[in-house]
Image: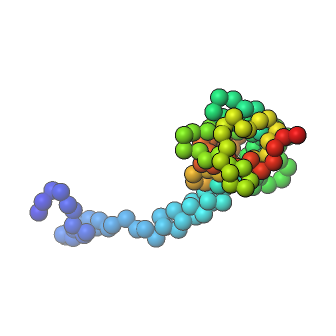
């Protein structure tokens, strides 16, 4: 017998039984966790630019923070920090390319993420995959 592996069962005299761990409970719990996490992720949302900083926008994301909450949503306003990286696509609503400098306070934008993100009161900084200016500030 090698010490690297254990037999599935050891029976000698009234011995000990070792069984492989059961996956019957683990699989449904993992599935439930995936479903619940998918429900709370956001792939994109729309709002107006509150502040333009160096390669980032601050946008009101209170609705996204409060999404899925039961009962009264809190009255706290939340700003999300949206990082503009070298990979972020910047376009207008017609698909024409824009530069970072083309965006100003008050523009309505759609922010898309590389994959779904969980936006919460304690998690509000994200890299954007794409920013689309839907309407210019007046």
User: The C terminus appears in which quarter of the rendering?
Assistant: top right
Task: Pick whichever, 83 or 34, lies toward us.
Answer: 83
Task: Pick whichever, 57 or 37, lies toward us.
Answer: 57
Query: Which residue reaches farthest left?
Result: 1
| Residue 17 visible to the viewer | yes
| Residue 78 visible to the viewer | no
Q: Is residue 102 above or below residue 94?
A: above
Residue 70 drawn at (x, y percent): 79, 54
Q: Residue at x 76, y 32 (%)?
A: 51
Residue 63 drawn at (x, y percent): 79, 48
Q: Residue at x 15, y 56 (%)?
A: 3
Q: How is the image coloured?
A: rainbow
Query: Which residue reaches farthest right?
Result: 138
Residue 45 drawn at (x, y percent): 72, 52
Residue 15 appears left or right of 35: left
Residue 94 appears left or right of 10: right
Task: Pick whichever, 41 or 90, lies toward us.
Answer: 90
Residue 26 drawn at (x, y percent): 47, 64
Query: Which residue reaches farthest top?
Result: 54
- Within the image, what quadrant is residue 74 found in? top right
Q: Residue at x 81, y 44 (%)?
A: 136
Q: Residue at x 67, y 44 (%)?
A: 98
The number of discs equals 0
Residue 52 appears left or right of 24: right
User: The N terminus appears in which quarter of the rendering?
Assistant: bottom left
């Amino acid at each position: 017998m090698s010490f690297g592996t254990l037999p599935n069962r050891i029976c000698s005299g009234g011995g000990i039984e070792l069984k492989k761990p059961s996956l019957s409970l683990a699989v449904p719990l993992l599935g439930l966790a995936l479903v619940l996490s998918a429900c709370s992720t956001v792939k994109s949302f729309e709002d107006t630019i509150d502040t333009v900083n160096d390669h980032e926008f601050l946008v009101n994301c209170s609705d996204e923070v409060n999404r899925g909450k039961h009962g009264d949503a809190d009255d706290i306003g939340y700003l999300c920090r949206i990082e503009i990286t070298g990979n972020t696509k910047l376009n207008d609503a017609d698909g024409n390319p824009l530069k970072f400098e083309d965006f100003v306070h008050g523009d309505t934008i759609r922010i898309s993420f590389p994959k779904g993100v969980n936006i919460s009161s304690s998690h509000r900084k994200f890299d954007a995959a794409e920013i689309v200016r839907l309407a210019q500030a007046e």
